[in-house]
Amino acid sequence: MGFIMDLVFEKTATEQLAAPAVLESQHGSVRPLAVEDLEAVAALFLTRFRRRRRHLLDRAVAETAEYMRRIYLDPAGQSGASNALVQINPQGQLGGFLGVLKARYELNGAVLNAAIIGPFMADSGTDHGSAGPQLLRALHQGEFDLYLTDSANRVSLAFARPMKYQLLPAHCLGWTRIFRPAAVASMMVRGRWPGLPRFALDPCARAFDAFARKRFEPPVQHSPSHRVHREPMNAGQFAERMPTLASDYVLRPLWQDGELPRLLALAAEKRADGPLHFGGTYDEAGRMLGCYAFYGQAGGMANLLQIQSSGSHWGATLDALIADAWAMGCAGIIGQTQGRFMPHLFSYKNVFFRYAGGTMVRSRIPEVAQAVRAGDIFIGGLMGDRWTRLSSDDFGR
């Protein structure tokens, strides 16, 4: 009860500090994203994150701008100005952009407003180092109780760490489990030289992978219980059961009014790694022990969106995920790490780890900071921005 009283006071103070519609400084102004900004923001995104040349942007700009309009200007169930921000330099040009999605968390019965930070970028041609700090300062004067990101690059980390963001090291790594090494190597070569014909590599890759199959095939079961089985599920079943599994965390998402099904529908629009699939693990009585969602198709790399389990069943749920990706004919699977299933990942052969993006949280509420330090927060996947098309898709092609 004491925490809830403290939180009410804190939130009242936060609302009094709500950011004005426009923040002015000698370096320019920061204001919410508007429709008239979309094309310029889309062009900046494509040149910074997709390495597109400006004279080849027309079709991609239109598609990217429309997608940004849907997720930043017309999010379901939200009203008022966009939470995403733009920085306009003194010459009236776009200097930078900060993509922000609004979400809700629950902590000890109290509801918290959360800002999920996505693309964070500045135009090197018009900005002189002021856009990034201006955008973050403006965001921190807003209505949010906590700010989080799961995809910060090293430049963003340099901006955020002095602003008292807490880094979650266990969530900053990506993991890769290889099933068919020659197929993975072939994809990497074609990615570097797109014009290389498939028949020059694929037959050799298939022959090698058939020879090495036993070495890279995942084990049948890591779980000590052989009574656990996996079953496919649909998006509706996943949305119904995920909140129950997420309740294991002290600081957890609060999805209301059909918000999670809408989020999954948007996540299913990603194209880079194949369709979105759902699965779950169950005991012999039919009780669900865990669930997962991943993108995948035969011959490609499966990409984990979300995995969640209860109690001691993380290993069995991870086993089921990897078995599904293998049975689908994927060349391997990649995903974001998190503390609760890292020990199970270590038990697999042919798993590799790499830095995949900074996961950070900032909050003025002591109980939030304590939960983050303890790793007792549901973050990443659906509570991040990697589910958006902006994280991977090649617009305009």
Image: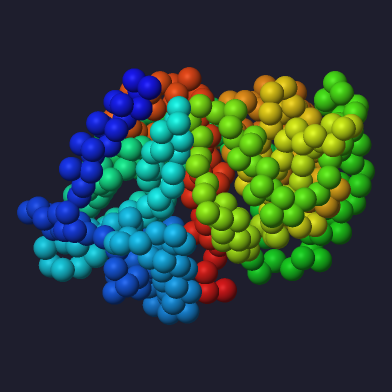
What kind of colouring is applied to the model shown?
rainbow
Q: Is residue 319 among the parts visible in the rendering? A: no
Residue 234 sits above or below residue 379 on the image: below
Q: Which residue is at the far left?
A: 26
Residue found 70% across the figure and 60% down from its top: 275
Q: How many marks?
A: 0
**Where residue 74 appears, x then y in whole percent?**
41, 66
Q: Relative to 244, say whether 343 is above or below.
A: above
The picture quadrant where one finds residue 49 is bottom left
**The one of 120 and 6 positioned closer to us in this rendering:** 6
Q: Residue at x 37, y 52 (%)?
A: 100
Closer to the camera, 53 or 270?
A: 270
The answer to whether 220 appears left or right of 171 in the picture is right
Which residue is drawn at the image coordinates 34% and 20% (left, top)? 2
| Farthest residue, direction front | 1
**x then y, percent, for residue 381:** 56, 44
The relative height of residue 239 versus residue 55 in the rendered view (above or below) is above
Name the side, left or right, on which 221 lies relative to 131. right
Identify the image quadrant of the C terminus: bottom right
Of the pair 44 and 233, the residue shown nearer to us: 233
Decide if residue 333 is in sight here: yes
User: Quadrant location of residue 125?
Assistant: bottom left
Q: For this rendering, which residue is in front, 338 or 94?
A: 338
Residue plotted at (59% across, 35% down): 246
Name the quarter where the N terminus is drawn: top left
- Which percent across, then down, holds residue 223? 83, 25
Rendered location of residue 300, percent (x, y): 74, 55
Q: Is residue 263 above or below residue 336?
A: below
